[in-house]
């Protein structure tokens, strides 16, 4: 798990479901097994299982394929909810970069 919290996690709070969504948003090109999602988001298997069905039913995650016995998943980039979350994440990053830029400009002025 990352030591530094992302802006998305800082904004929404450090909750397991938020960490999973954040991981999948940041890595939207690839698909992952639930085990990989647990490992990379810092969420235990048992905790993931408590909310995974909700993520599927809300259309936030989608199954992509099977690799051996493992089902692979990724963020559902076609979902209106995911599009809004992704846009919010981009705006948070943009706002943070503007703030850092203004601080550096003030320091050099």
Image (cartoon, rainbow, N blue to C red):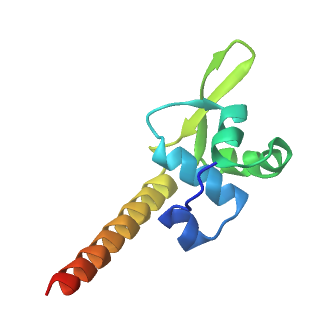
**Of all residues shown, which one is farthest toward the front?**
108
Query: Does 41 sit above or below residue 95?
Result: above
Residue 101 figure quarter: bottom left
Query: Does 106 sit above or below residue 33?
Result: below
At a point 74% along the width and 49% down the height, the residue shown is: 43
Q: Position of residue 48 (x, y in %)?
A: 77, 47
At a point 55% along the width and 60% down the height, the residue shown is: 4
Q: Position of residue 17 (x, y in %)?
A: 68, 56
Does residue 79 appear left or right of residue 36 in this picture?
left
Residue 45 figure quarter: top right
Q: Position of residue 30 (x, y in %)?
A: 49, 31
Does residue 2 appear left or right of residue 90 in this picture?
right
Does residue 13 appear left or right of residue 75 in this picture?
right
At a point 59% along the width and 70% down the height, the residue shown is: 12
At a point 31% along the width and 78% down the height, the residue shown is: 99
**Of all residues shown, which one is farthest toward the left?**
109
For this rendering, which residue is in front, 84 or 42?
42
For this rendering, which residue is in front, 86 or 93?
93
Q: Quadrant of the C terminus?
A: bottom left
Q: Position of residue 64 (x, y in %)?
A: 57, 26
**Of all residues shown, which one is farthest toward the top?**
68
Give the number of marks.
0
């Amino acid at each position: 798990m990352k030591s530094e919290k992302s802006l998305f996690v800082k904004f929404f709070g450090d909750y397991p479901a938020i960490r999973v969504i954040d991981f999948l948003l940041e890595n939207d090109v690839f698909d992952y097994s639930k085990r990989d999602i647990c490992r990379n988001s810092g969420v235990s298997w048992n905790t993931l299982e408590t909310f995974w069905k909700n993520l599927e039913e809300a259309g936030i995650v989608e199954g992509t394929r099977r690799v051996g016995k493992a089902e692979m998943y990724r963020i559902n980039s076609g979902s209106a909810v995911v599009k809004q979350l992704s846009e919010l994440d981009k705006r948070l990053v943009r706002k943070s970069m503007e703030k850092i830029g203004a601080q550096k400009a003030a320091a050099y002025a």
